[in-house]
Image: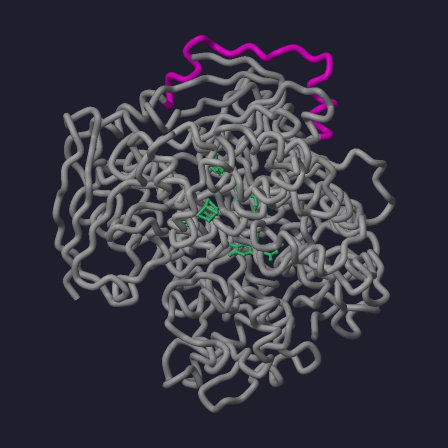
Amino acid sequence: MQVDLRILRYDPERDAAPHWESYSVDAAPRDRVLNLLQSVKDLQDGSLTFRRSCAHGICGSDAMLINGRNRLACRIRVEQLGRKVSVAPLGGLPVVKDLVVEMEGFFEKYRSVMPFFVNDTPTPARERRQSAKDRERYDDTTKCILCAACTTSCPSFWAQPSYVGPAAIVQAHRFIFDSRDTAAEDRLEILADDDGVWKCRTTFNCVTACPREINVTGAILEVTRAIVARHG
Amino acid sequence: MRIDTDAIVVGAGGAALWAALELAHEGVQTAVLTKLYPTRSHTGAAQGGVCAALGNLEEDHWEWHMFDTVKGGDYLSDQDAAEVLAREAIERVIELEHMGLPFNRTPEGKIDQRRFGGHTRDFGEAPVKRACYAADRTGHMILQTLYQQCIKAGVRFYDEYHVVDLLFEGGDANEGGRAAGVVAYRIADGEIHTFRAKAVLLATGGYGRAWRITSNAYSLAGDGMALAYRRGVPLEDMEFYQFHPTGVYGIGILLSEAARGEGGTLLNRDGERFMARYAPRLMELAPRDMVSRAMYLEIRDGRGIDGKDYLFLDVSHLGRKVIEEKLPDITDFARIYLGVEPLREPVPVQPTAHYAMGGVPTDLSARVLRDETGALVPGLYAAGEAACVSVHGANRLGTNSLVDLLVFGRRAGKAMAEDVRGGTLPEIAADADEPVRAEIEALRTRAVGERPDTIRAEMTRLMDEKVGVFRDATLLSTAVERIGELRERYARVVVADRGTTFNTDLLETRELGYLLDCAQATAASALARKESRGAHSREDYPERNDAAWLAHTFAFRRDDAQPDLRYKPVSITRFEPKPRTY
Ligand SMILES: Cc1cc2nc3c(=O)[nH]c(=O)nc-3n(C[C@H](O)[C@H](O)[C@H](O)COP(=O)(O)OP(=O)(O)OC[C@H]3O[C@@H](n4cnc5c(N)ncnc54)[C@H](O)[C@@H]3O)c2cc1C
Ligand code: SF4
Ligand code: FES
């Protein structure tokens, strides 16, 4: 089938501002948007720029705004979208070139929530025990691939870029609810900040955006409740 | 810009991150350079698990794990290395748990374990539960956990820096030189930076993108192997490339062996479990090379589905609970990429290019070997899929790559920490970056020539057809010749993007150059090896020939000629080579 593909392009060395370009691309129904982009790059314009690596939804490189929704280009089939496909960079982050956005700020926020396991008690000779039930408690948030689809679909983040954002809270959640970890208090303290969980307006955009089907808003609410319980 | 540090780690996958962590704990100033954000590394794609003889569910011993590794490798594995792998796997997996890795648990709360191809009890008697796992995202959790611990330890990362050359003091590696640093291209703005250090680790992963049907990420272009090869380092055992049996038909994305570990079956057009004819004891859990060959033969004899080039992987009888709890990602891939519902229908699969057993030769401390005599390249290290220790021999067992990353990544870090203590920084010329700067400028500004994508398409098709599951002298000599032609065409390649901002066109074209180097070493080494062993199956030499070929290939690059091939004996400590039956 022939797909009418529109891409929001921007090259800071050539363009004053982003502009839409149209391409007609020959595609199979099972092709994914990433295949369309690759085809444009190979056959029509080699300067088209986007990040990608794994090509199957596990590395988180190619989150972008596709037909008005944040998704991974490698996970959305053309047949799910129809003959008209539009692709733009993620919102709310500075555009570097074409579909590539500046990710440094996003990762900075991620690193700010102590996204690492802490337990300074002496390590046993074998594994620390954890019940399957306790393991299940934080299973959902271990799936995060830091693609930024959630944070960049969040109206609160667009309005106030200082907001730590859903992805960072998801990553904190993964440790706060891990029965083996001992630094939950410190993370809750960080997220009780003005730029922490309070900025969430439960619009659920993040849940819709997450390619890993993580209940992002649910995780934010659990963290919020833990903060409230701690002060209550 | 010029940056001095004590140690450099190139890459940020599992091997690189464990080395970096070890260096941080030893207080060594380290720069980690990675062309992808660390969490984008392909280690994150590993689904199935990481093997260690913990014995949490049934009796198990590291000696059994070592035996399986050696036998799986068709006796080409260096047994001293396989012993280190199997012994240290246990400590490393426990250590990962201590770093917070969310392993699945047994009812008593221990790390859960499951079966995986080629892993047995009692030296080959029956499958054993040895693979530790976190749902089917074990690699994702390893990558995340190690990166998290690196953040905690304050490791210095240079994200989206693409290493384009290696620097030496006193001549290239083959001239006796010592590793002195790297040249890196900052992707964001095209600036070239020179990093100088006393020790350099290459942990850049594999080169699966040399094939068309592949489980590998776009970024896996053999960068570290090719860069070392160009500087006089040999590449070991490149003819041994693994094809995984269950790639998604037509695309190559991997459906993990976990599907078969949990009881999934392979069926031909008659609905027959054909593995009964090839490996009656282990059936679908026979090592990958055997299963891939069986699939190829079924297809060639017209027993593919509808007579086409694929077969079925069936998990529908396992029930919703097993499928959804233990194989969620696999189910998801079948649904997303094929529109198939594995709860009800079988999934179309075909063998897919997957893993390089070969790579940059190293000793047990990840120190790079200069030649087949075991002489070292001072200051240079390699670990992970880019390296060849060699633990995997002629065929890697499932889950043994992740073990390799953990065990030898850590050993690299330890050895480097020792190496940099006290020593002085090497001398490098002020214009050491000049050769690669000139190469990149020439590529960026060349006005007329061929686009890289036609060369890439021809190379990947060629590798699929001629350097695949089955090989013979005709296929391989054609491949060698055609890769030579492609290399000549590559010398005149042009890019469309002439800018300096995030120029992926330029970098992907450089990656094509790395792939061509790796492809050449692979095809030439394969043509020379006149026997069948592990993943290297020659139809014209169908038997393993220990008298002539129980040896590792070392390929040395030559500018305008085929590589020079030499051979190194295999280390045999405990297990005498025997015929390999399952
Ligand atoms: C789909 C899939 C499933 C798998 N499942 C399993 C499994 O279940 N069990 C198992 O044991 N093994 C499995 N494997 C194999 C295993 O995952 C890989 O072999 C292993 O993860 C490789 O890790 P690595 O650290 O060597 O490199 P990678 O994780 O591939 O990382 C390479 C790193 O090098 C960097 N890099 C590369 N080139 C450059 C350059 N020029 N400059 C700067 N940086 C560079 C990249 O940015 C990246 O950080 C699987 C492989 C695949 C493809
Ligand atoms: S929570 Fe989901 S959308 Fe957000 S970064 Fe993680 S994987 Fe991406
Ligand atoms: S390319 Fe890795 S998530 Fe899409």
Q: Is residue B1 above or below residue B71?
A: above
Residue A11: horizontal and vertical position, in percent?
21, 30
Magenta region, residue range: B414-436
Q: Is residue B248 above or below residue B437?
A: below
**Residue at 54% from the left image edge and 76% from the top image edge:** B294
Foreground of the two, A114 or B72: A114
> Was residue B420 drawn as part of the magenta stretch in this picture?
yes
Apparent side of residue B324 relative to residue A55 in the rendered image (left or right): right
Residue B447: horizontal and vertical position, in percent?
15, 30
Of the 4 image quadrants, the one containing the N terminus of chain B is: top left
Residue B56: horizontal and vertical position, in percent?
82, 61
Foreground of the two, B6 or A220: A220
Dividing the picture into quarters, in which one does residue B98 lie? top right
Of the 4 image quadrants, the one containing the C terminus of chain B is: bottom right
Asked if one can make out residue B374 in the rendered structure from this viewpoint, the answer is: no
Apparent side of residue B272 relative to residue B457 in the rendered image (left or right): right
Foreground of the two, B178 or B145: B145
Apparent side of residue A227 relative to residue A206 in the rendered image (left or right): right
Dividing the picture into quarters, in which one does residue B248 lie? bottom left
